[in-house]
Image (cartoon, grey):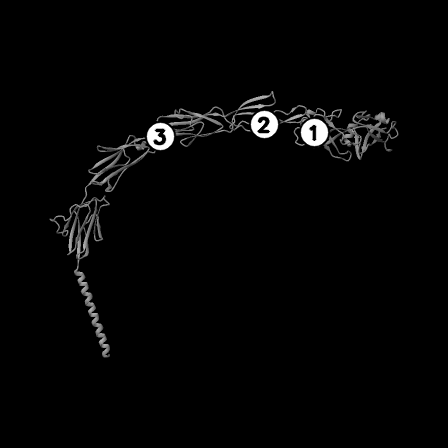
Amino acid sequence: MSNKLTKILTYCSLVLVILAVVITTAICLTTALSYKVTVDVVIQNIVPEEATDANVTVNINGTEVSTQRENTTLTVNAQKDREVTITFNMTDYNYVGLYNGTKDTYQGTDSILAEPTEYVYKFTVTQDTNYTLVVDAASFYQVSVGYNADKPVDEVEGGAIAVTASGAGVYADGDTANSYIVREGAEVSVSYEASEYTFTGWTNGDATSTDSVYTFVANGNTTVTGNFEAYVYYDVRVNYAFDEQAIGGNIAVTANGQEVTQEGITLKIRDGANVTLSVVSGTGYDFTGWTNVTDNATSATVNIAVSANAEYTANFNVIKYDIEYVDGEESTTVQDVVYGSTLQAGPEDIYANGWNKFLGWTLNGRTYTQAIFDGNNREITLTASYRNQSEINYTFDAAATDFSTAGTISYNTANGLDLANAPTRDYYNLIGISINGTQYLFNEEKTGFADAQNTIDQYLVNQSASTLTVTPIWELDGAPITVNLPSDSDFSGNMDNEDQITADANIETLMVTEFFGIDASQIASFKIQYNSRTYTVSRTTADAYATISFADVFDTIGFDASASTELTFIFTSNV
């Protein structure tokens, strides 16, 4: 190793030694300038176990120690000539004194701190110092709370009573119900909870209070009693009544919010409590007042203080309407109807120079056929309204067919028929019209309809249109029927008269013997043919073939003179 390196190492070692000496010296000086401050806590008598909040706390310059029932010690270091602050607090313990000396040497000395307003002691530390804080258990009393009721709880439905005590320094005695261990001088607050009872007050020896929460200062053993009286209940019956039933009406009444039926409900109301009666609605009725209510008896809602059994009835009168029905100058009907009644039926249609159709009852320019009386106007006059058919023009349109022309028939309810443009048909007379299957025949003069006011006019008054489609009704009128006797007929050569029959509305029978010159008794069978259709004459008597009913023939073969007027008669002889 070189001399230079050796010198460097020597210098470094010397520096380290000097630094160590300096540090050690500083530590020693520092230690020499701080002192111990110690506080011993001595508890002369401990508090009862029930006093769970009991506590003694000592704090020296922010360092703290606490204890409940055991002696303890707190020691801190404090620099010389610095101020030291000792604070201490206690709960459920009384201050005895703060003494110089340890817990073993303080006896016989005087307290350095009299009973202070604040538990604080300050001093400047110049040496190790030891103090002793002495405390003693506070005095405790036995406080019992209970209640007295005029009626046992188990005899009162829903009854319950509970009394409790509370406050700082008030502790429940675990061995005895409703008993408390209370620190002397503590404020005790006694309260209750009760159901179905009225609280009447507290008794505490000679002291009494009606406050719901009673507070006193504990200065001895005592018993506090809460006094209660069971509620008294009364039966309150509520119903409603009305003079007449409204149609579709409704009554809603409540008692303390409960729905009241017509038969009534009964409420149990506590003595002195209120019952509230309310008419919620009375559709169709006028509320007239409450029975057995003295104040504001006609008010919809009343509040009544209950002090005895009682019954109350809400009374209603049905709303009525005076209705005057006027039908012409001399026809007036007055009705007294209840709420919800319907409009009376109108009169029958009347005939006065044409049918007049009843349209409804008119009020304030509006016509009604159906209505319910439920409004505010209770005096109403209704006037019958008609659709007047007098001198109304109608047009009956008839379409053309294979055998008739189209045409129009005009009809005025006052002036009658106009057939100038009526449909026509060969060999037929127009004798009426058919509408929807109903026939309406003309009178003989064809100036109107037969029995018009009871038939066509009454039908027309109920129609909204004045032009109707109709089917003509025709009647035969002198149709020339050509009679054929074919060569294969047994009596083809016996025809004495001309070979034509004139058919009209009056033709009823054909005398075979006279027309054909045939002895009817010699006829075995007889047929009439028309347009491929055949009518067979049935023989039931010896002279059955002497006369033929043309009505039966025409109906069976569908005879139509406009189509063909030729009939073929086929006789078979029995000779």
Label 3, on which residue?
273
Could you tell me residue 322's position as x and y percent? 53, 23
Label 2, on which residue?
362
- The picture quadrant where one finds residue 438 is top right
Q: CA distance from mark 1 to mark 3?
A: 81 Å
Disc 1 is placed on an element classified as strand
Report the number of numbered marks: 3
- Give the residue furthest to the front: 365
Could you tell me residue 507's position as x and y percent? 80, 26
Q: CA distance from mark 1 to mark 2?
A: 26 Å
Closer to the eye: label 1 or 3? 1
The answer to whether residue 540 is above or below residue 48 is above
Asked if one can make out residue 343 in the rendered structure from this viewpoint, the answer is yes
Judge the density around disc 1: few (<14), some (14-19), many (≥20) Cα neighbours within 10 Å. Answer: some
Judge the density around disc 3: few (<14), some (14-19), many (≥20) Cα neighbours within 10 Å. Answer: few
Could you tell me residue 478's position as x and y percent? 81, 28
Asked if one can make out residue 519 in the rendered structure from this viewpoint, the answer is no
